[in-house]
Image: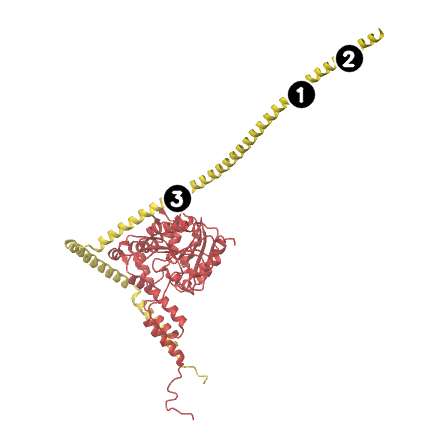
Chain colours: A yellow, B red
């Protein structure tokens, strides 16, 4: 291929259009950017507004006679919808507040429940310990009675021992007397 | 055997492949339906009248504080999510931010009484409350673009809601300088040109008039967009971008009469926002009430909102942490190119409470 640049007029068209656009805009500003045009435009706008206003008023009057709704009527209805939307919004925000207070309350309740659970657990533990100690108390009472019984038995045994000792002394005395008697008989 | 044509030299060398692509694209552009916009997944959080609060969840949440976008009342906010490749919102959700967008909707005749104050008190305030509740956070970052930035700033100065950061881009605050033809601006300021009566009659400013107003300010005669397209029509990507931009530019929103009156009289003519005389309900708007961290972005090639219209906010607020940045961009280019996402992230990442992994 040759080093020749291919035909592309669009770049030139674009550059030319930029130039034209600028020149046309400058010309337009030159024509319109003056006080007279501003004042004339203001008069024109005011005239147009008055014409449209009158036209609208007549239209409203005619629509009223024909019993037809106008744009204003539709706009009033739309505003009622917006008012309803705002009321719902306000209610929704109040519900938010309620939700928030419910949330904090439920959190508080949760913590109370948590504490109660711990108290119940502790009470149960105490109850078990109480039963245990009661049992122990009964057992110790039993043991005490047994001990008392044993003591009584022991005291009984000591009486028996004393009696036995007295008997033993008596027997010994009898034996001595017998021996004395026997001894005198032999000597006679 | 080479043949010598008698017209050699007269017929220019044409890159047939390129020309075929160019005209195929032009044909497609004329015959195909409009491009799809706003493809980032979103859910509706709240709706009132025509306004909708959209929620764009983060792909993988990295920051606790969500971004709340407030766009201008003049245009549709889908410029922030115009193309999956350059969508500001998609980029931010990919970066780990939860994003909320308040779409003001398209007002009708019945909305003629909605002024800037109503938009702020009954729409923006409620939407911010909803976003805070929806995201279950304690603070929010407000991001305002163009007139949305002005509205966000006004709201931030009277807000009871916790606004941690305020980001405003290409925002008109000081209206002592009005962009446009000099005599018209003068006539507008001294009352030689008023459209109050016209606004009362129409109720809302029709979208065509809004478009004409913007044309009058910048370039009343405008056709170079078509010659640029023809010049670059062989480039499929450019054609796609052009179509989206063209759709957005022509897709104007009607402006409510009351809001327009406030904008024109209170802000533009009397410059009440800078003077601290603007009223929302019964509250005086004093920008010095803003204590949120502030980030202001201007475009050096912006011919709609000049740098000296945005910059004064830096001295009017009480914020201790405030940053001003002027980027090489036009008024819309910042959002259209998607570079806005990177700029926002760079500043907001350290101020949005990074979530621990």
Q: Residues within 10 Å of mark 1 (few under 14, many from 20)?
A: few
Chain of residue at mark 2: A
Q: Is residue B341 left or right of residue B108?
A: right
* Mark in front: 1 vs 2: 2
Q: Alpha carbon of mark 1 to alpha carbon of mark 2: how far?
A: 30 Å
**Going from the N terminus, do you reach mark 1 or mark 3 first?**
3
Q: Quadrant of residue A105?
A: top left
Q: Alpha carbon of mark 2 to alpha carbon of mark 3: how far?
A: 110 Å
Q: Quadrant of residue A139?
A: top right
Q: Position of residue B286 (x, y in %)?
A: 39, 49
Image: A47 above or below B23: above
**Going from the N terminus, do you reach mark 1 or mark 2 first?**
1
Front in this rendered view, residue B224 or B176: B224
Q: Secondary structure at mark 2?
A: helix
Give me the residue at 44% from left, 83% from top: A4
Chain of residue at mark 3: A
Front in this rendered view, residue B349 or B62: B62
Q: Residue tagged by mark 1? A: A154
Q: Alpha carbon of mark 1 to alpha carbon of mark 3: how far?
A: 80 Å
Give me the residue at 41% from left, 70% from top: B237
Q: Which mark is residue A99?
A: 3
Q: Position of residue B152 (x, y in %)?
A: 39, 53
Q: Residue tagged by mark 2? A: A175
State the count of labels. 3
Q: Is residue A154 left or right of residue B283?
A: right
Can residue B174 be seen? no
Please tell me if label 2 and label 3 are on a single chain.
yes
Q: Secondary structure at mark 3?
A: helix
Furthest-bottom residue in view?
Answer: B1
Front in this rendered view, residue B213 or B105: B105
């Amino acid at each position: 291929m040759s080093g020749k640049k291919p035909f592309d007029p669009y770049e030139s068209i674009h550059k030319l259009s930029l130039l034209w656009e600028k020149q046309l805009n400058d010309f337009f500003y030159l024509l319109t950017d003056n006080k007279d045009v501003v004042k004339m435009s203001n008069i024109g706008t005011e005239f147009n507004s008055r014409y449209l206003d009158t036209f609208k008023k007549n239209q409203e009057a005619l629509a009223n006679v024909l019993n037809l709704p106008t744009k204003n009527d539709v706009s009033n209805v739309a505003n009622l919808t917006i008012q309803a939307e705002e009321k719902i919004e306000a209610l929704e925000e109040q519900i938010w507040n309620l939700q928030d207070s419910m949330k904090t309350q439920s959190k508080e309740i949760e913590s109370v429940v948590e504490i109660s659970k711990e108290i119940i657990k502790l009470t149960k533990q105490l109850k078990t310990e109480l039963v245990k100690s009661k049992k122990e108390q009964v057992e110790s009472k039993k043991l005490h009675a047994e001990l008392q019984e044993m003591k009584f038995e022991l005291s009984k045994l000591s009486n028996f021992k004393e009696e036995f000792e007295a008997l033993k002394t008596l027997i010994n005395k009898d034996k001595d007397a017998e021996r004395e008697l026997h001894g005198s008989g032999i000597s006679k | 055997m080479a043949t010598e044509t008698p017209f050699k030299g007269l017929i220019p060398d044409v890159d047939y492949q390129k020309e075929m692509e160019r005209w195929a694209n032009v044909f497609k552009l004329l015959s195909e339906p409009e491009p799809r916009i706003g493809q980032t997944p979103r859910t509706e959080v709240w709706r009132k009248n025509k306004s909708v609060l959209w929620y764009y969840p983060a792909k993988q949440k990295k920051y606790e504080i969500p971004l709340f976008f407030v766009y201008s009342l003049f245009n549709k906010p889908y410029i922030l999510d115009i193309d999956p490749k350059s969508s500001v919102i998609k980029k931010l959700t990919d970066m780990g931010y939860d994003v909320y967008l308040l779409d003001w909707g398209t007002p009708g005749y019945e909305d003629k009484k909605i002024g800037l104050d109503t938009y702020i008190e009954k729409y923006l305030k409620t939407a911010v409350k909803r976003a805070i509740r929806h995201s279950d956070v304690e603070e929010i970052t407000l991001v305002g673009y163009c007139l949305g930035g002005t509205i966000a700033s006004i709201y931030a100065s009277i807000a009871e809601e916790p606004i941690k950061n305020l980001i405003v881009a290409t925002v008109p605050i000081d209206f002592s300088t009005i962009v446009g033809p000099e005599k018209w601006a003068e006539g507008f300021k001294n009352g030689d040109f008023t459209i109050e009566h016209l606004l009362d009659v129409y109720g809302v400013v029709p979208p065509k008039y809004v478009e004409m107003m913007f044309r009058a300010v910048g370039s009343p005669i405008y056709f170079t967009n078509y010659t640029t397209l023809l010049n670059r029509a062989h480039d499929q990507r450019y054609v796609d971008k052009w179509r989206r931009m063209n759709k957005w530019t022509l897709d104007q929103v009607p402006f409510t009469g009351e809001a327009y009156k406030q904008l024109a009289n209170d802000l533009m003519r009397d410059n009440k926002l800078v003077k601290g005389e603007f009223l929302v309900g019964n509250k005086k708007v004093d920008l010095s009430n803003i204590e949120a961290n502030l980030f202001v972005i201007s475009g050096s090639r912006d011919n709609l909102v000049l740098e000296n219209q945005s910059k004064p906010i830096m001295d009017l607020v009480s914020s201790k942490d405030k940053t001003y940045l002027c980027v090489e961009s036009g008024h819309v280019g910042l959002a259209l190119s998607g570079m806005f996402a990177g700029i926002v992230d760079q500043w907001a990442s350290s101020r949005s409470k990074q979530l621990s992994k």
